[in-house]
Amino acid sequence: MTLSEELAWRGFANQTTFKSTTELDGAPLTFYWGVDPSAPSMTVGNLAAAMMVRHFIAHGHKAVLLVGGATGMIGDPDGKSQERSLMSTDEIGANKTAIATQYSRVFGGQEFTLVDNYEWFKDMGYLQFLRDIGKHVPMRQMLGREFVQTRLSENGDGISYAEFSYVLIQAYDFLYMNREMGVSLQLCGSDQWGNSIAGVDLIRRLTGNEAHVWSAPLIINKATGQKFGKSEDGAVWLDEKLTSVYQFYQFWLNVDDEAVGDYLKIYTLLPKDDIEDVLKKFKTHPAERHAQKTLAYEVTKLVHGQDKAEAARRVTEVLFSAAGYGVLLETDFEQLKRELPVYQIKSGEDMVGVLVKEGMFFSLSEARRFIEQGSLYINGQKFNNSLLGEADFIHGKYAIVRRGKNTHAILQLAD
C-alpha cells in the first residue's frame, strides 16, 4: 500500500495543497509537525496526528518534530473565544521537556530531528521581525481569519496584538525550516490549516520555493458529535500522572461500537489485514468486545510500553471478568492502588469491621446483609464471614474485596 493509499484508508486525508495526493508517493520529502507546550502532556487528540506522522516516516519521509517554545509563549488563539493566560517561562520549560519525552516514546525506534522554535526566535529583534517578516504578510489575509472576525465582532471578547500575531510566528517557523533544513511540507490537524497556509504563502513570497500542507481531519466522537478525546474527568492525556495507565486503557476499552473500527485504523499500527480480522471477529461476537480490547491494548502499549499495557489488561480482566486473581503480579497492585481505595488490615483482624470503619458499608448490619446475600467477595470468592490469615493475601500483601458488582477496594496487610 502506498502512503497516499494508507492515509486515505486510515482516515488521515483532509485538505492539502498538493494537486494530487500521489505526490506523496514519490521522492522522500522533509516535513515537520509540532506541538505547543501549552500543557505538560499531549492528549489523544495530538496522538492522532502523531500516528499520521509515523506513517510518513515509515514510508521514507524525513521528520522534523517541533516543540513550540516560542509559539507556546503566546498560545494559538484559533478556536479560542477568550484571551489565553500567559504561562511562566518555567512552566513552558517544564512542558517542553515533558512533550519531548513523549515524542521519544510515541516515535520510539523512528528517526526524527527534534527542534524548538525558541532557538531561532530568542535572538531576533522586534524591528528585525517586522522588517523581514511582517512586511511581507498582508493584513487582509490576517483579518480574514474566522476566529479573528469572531473575536472582533460586537459580541466577541476582542483579541490582543500578541495573539493576533501568533500566525506570523508559526509562518516564520515554516520559512526558517525551509531555508535551514529543507523542510517543504507541514503536517497538521484541520484546525491548523489557516496557520499552515500562512507559512506556505510566506515561503513563496520570500524564497519562491514551493511548500505544501497536508492536514488530517479532527477526530469526532460519533456517539456525541463532539471532538474526540474527552472522558468524564476531562481530557485524556498521554502522561500517566494526569491520566493513569488504567484510566487510559479503560477509555479505549469503552469506545462505542460504531467508531471502534475507525479508531483501530487511526490509533494503532496494525496492518490492514489484521484490523479486518479483528473487526470480523468483533462483528461475529460483539458482546465480547474484541475490537475494543485490541484497541485498548495496542494504544496503551504504544504510549506506556508493553509491560504497563499487559498490567492494565490483567487488572481489567480480574476486576470485570472471570480471570483468576492469582494472575496479578505484585507490580500490578501499584497500578491498582492508584484507582481503588486501600484499606490497611492486620492478619486475623475482622475484615467486616474494617470495611465499615473505612466506609464501604454504612453499618455492620448492612455488611452482614451483603454477606447473607452472597454479594461480598474476597479475591473473587464469596466471603463466608471468616477471619483472614496471611494465606488469603496475594503475594502475602494484598487482597481485593468486592461489594456487589462493581465496588472494589484493596486490603493491604499491615506490617
Image (cartoon, helix red, strand yellow):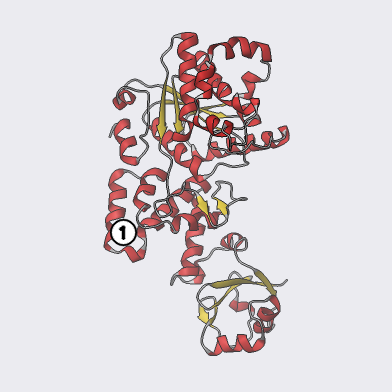
Residue 86 place in picture, x, y as percent: 69, 34
Query: Mark 1, residues whose alpha carbon is within 10 Å: few (<14), some, or many (≥20)?
Result: some
Q: Nearer the viewer, residue 253 or 336?
A: 253
Q: Nearer the viewer, residue 143 or 240?
A: 143
Can residue 26 be seen here?
yes
Quarter of the rendering containing residue 385 = bottom right
Horizontal side of 271 relative to 156 (left or right) equals left
Residue 346 place in picture, x, y as percent: 71, 78
Residue 257 place in picture, x, y as percent: 36, 57
The residue under the point 34% across, 41% down is 10
The residue under the point 30% across, 54% down is 279
Horizontal side of 281 relative to 355 (left or right) equals left
Q: Nearer the viewer, residue 89 or 308?
A: 89
Horizontal side of 28 relative to 80 (left or right) equals left
Instruction: Name the residue tied to disc 1.
Output: 282
Q: Quadrant of the N terminus?
A: top left
Residue 143 place in picture, x, y as percent: 53, 24
